[in-house]
């Protein structure tokens, strides 16, 4: 594009974001700072249409920017800085939260408040977490609290009931055996090695391994590293003109309720370099009902090795500058809040 074409195109995009209506050359002539006739702008718009930046719903209507036009417009934006007091407030809010789950939930809620879109945050653990330590605590009625901590700072607690009691000193011996021999191993490696040791004839003479079998059979070292995903503000989509029938709107909400589908949406951001904001305009390939939605996301790598994505889902006609700035600032505060805990 020539500089003039680019300037006119971006004015068309801004006009469409404001009104949601096809944009006529006459309205752009009134907005344009240089004195250009409607006829001159019509010629530019025709060239832009030939290049795939504009479409025309019908002959007598104005032009509508395509996804290609929105991508060009987005590249021209400069992200706004957040006021220092607002950043300090965000940092204080995150500083009061003690778990990754709580910070993921707060991230999505804060993004929704700041953008009026659908705030989404996800923390995706390592596929093969390494053991940091376990703790075993005797409880009444032959129960044991099993605590497993991995080196990416995930914690799993489970209370199990046993057929025969284990004394506190036996639990200490089992804990020390696991922590001394297997700290730094992946849980998968530990399970394989323990299974191998328990199969050996010598295990029959090893009192610790005999007692360990009781806990191992109750799921000790079974650790489901499920992603933590939170989404807030889906109801904000109801008032938007997404050109969806009631049935299509119900399909959209059903799609957003599927954790796996939301994760697939976020997966595309994990291919981006960490800390680099990205925008996907039009999500029809993810689901037909998302054709007029855009997703703005920021991938971050937390200091404990967990991958995370913060994002906002909203209409194609969203205020991209404001939403991109919100995603960037909240994402960085989320990342910094994790670093401060290590």
Image: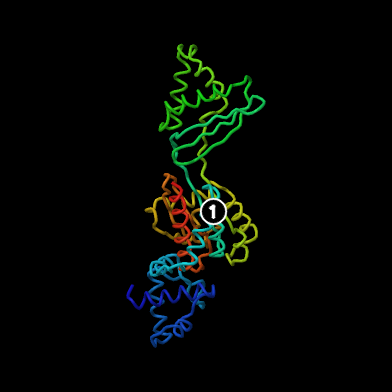
Q: How is the image coloured?
A: rainbow
Q: Which residue is mark 1?
A: 96
Residue at 45% in and 41% down: 152
| Quadrant of the image occupied by residue 252 | bottom right
Question: Residue 153 at x, y = what percent?
Answer: 47, 41
- Position of 132 with respect to 109 (left or right) is left
Near-viewer residue (313 or 38): 313
Residue plotted at (45% across, 75% down): 12
Q: Residue visible at 44% across and 45% down?
A: 306
9, above or below 100, in the image: below
Residue 286 appears left or right of 144: left
Q: Nearer the viewer, residue 339 or 168?
A: 168
Pinpoint residue 27: horizontal percent, then vertical percent.
48, 82
260 versus 249 height, above or below: above
Q: Position of residue 51 (x, y in %)?
A: 37, 69
Instruction: Check disc 1: other Cα within 10 Å, few if <14, some if 14-19, many if 20+.
Output: few
Q: Secondary structure at mark 1?
A: loop
Q: Is residue 11 above or below residue 203?
A: below
Query: Quadrant where the N terminus lies?
Result: bottom left
Q: Nearer the viewer, residue 91 or 172?
A: 172
- Judged from this view, the residue extending furthest toward the left is 2
Q: Where does residue 269 sit, x and y in percent of width and height?
A: 43, 53
């Amino acid at each position: 594009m020539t500089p003039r074409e680019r300037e006119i195109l971006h004015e068309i995009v801004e006009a469409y974001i404001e009104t949601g209506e096809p944009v006529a050359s006459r309205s752009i002539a009134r907005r344009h700072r240089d004195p250009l006739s409607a006829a001159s702008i019509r010629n530019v718009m025709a060239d832009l249409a030939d290049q795939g930046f504009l479409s025309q719903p019908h002959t007598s209507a104005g032009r509508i920017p395509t996804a290609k036009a929105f991508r060009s417009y987005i590249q021209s934006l400069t992200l706004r800085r957040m006021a220092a007091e607002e950043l300090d407030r965000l940092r204080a809010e995150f500083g009061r939260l003690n778990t990754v789950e709580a910070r993921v939930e707060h991230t999505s809620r804060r993004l929704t408040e700041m953008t009026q879109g659908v705030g989404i945050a996800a923390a995706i653990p390592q596929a093969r977490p390494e053991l940091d330590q376990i703790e075993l605590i005797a409880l009444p009625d032959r129960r044991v609290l099993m605590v497993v901590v991995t080196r990416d700072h995930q914690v799993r607690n489970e209370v199990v009931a046993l057929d025969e009691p284990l004394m506190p000193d036996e639990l200490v011996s089992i804990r020390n055996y696991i922590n001394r021999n297997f700290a730094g191993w992946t849980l998968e490696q530990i399970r394989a090695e323990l299974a191998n040791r328990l199969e050996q004839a010598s295990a029959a003479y090893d009192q610790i391994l005999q007692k360990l079998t009781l806990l191992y059979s109750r799921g000790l070292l079974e650790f489901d590293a499920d992603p933590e995903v939170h989404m807030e503000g889906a109801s904000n989509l109801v008032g938007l003109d997404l050109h969806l029938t009631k049935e299509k709107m119900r399909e959209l909400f059903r799609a957003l309720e599927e954790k796996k589908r939301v994760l697939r949406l976020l997966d595309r951001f994990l291919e981006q370099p960490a800390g680099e904001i990205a925008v996907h305009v039009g999500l029809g390939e993810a689901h037909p009902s998302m054709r007029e939605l855009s997703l703005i996301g920021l991938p971050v790598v937390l200091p404990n090795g967990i991958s995370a994505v913060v994002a906002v889902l909203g209409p194609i006609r969203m205020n991209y500058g404001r939403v991109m700035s919100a995603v960037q600032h909240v994402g960085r505060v989320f990342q910094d809040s994790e670093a401060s805990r290590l």
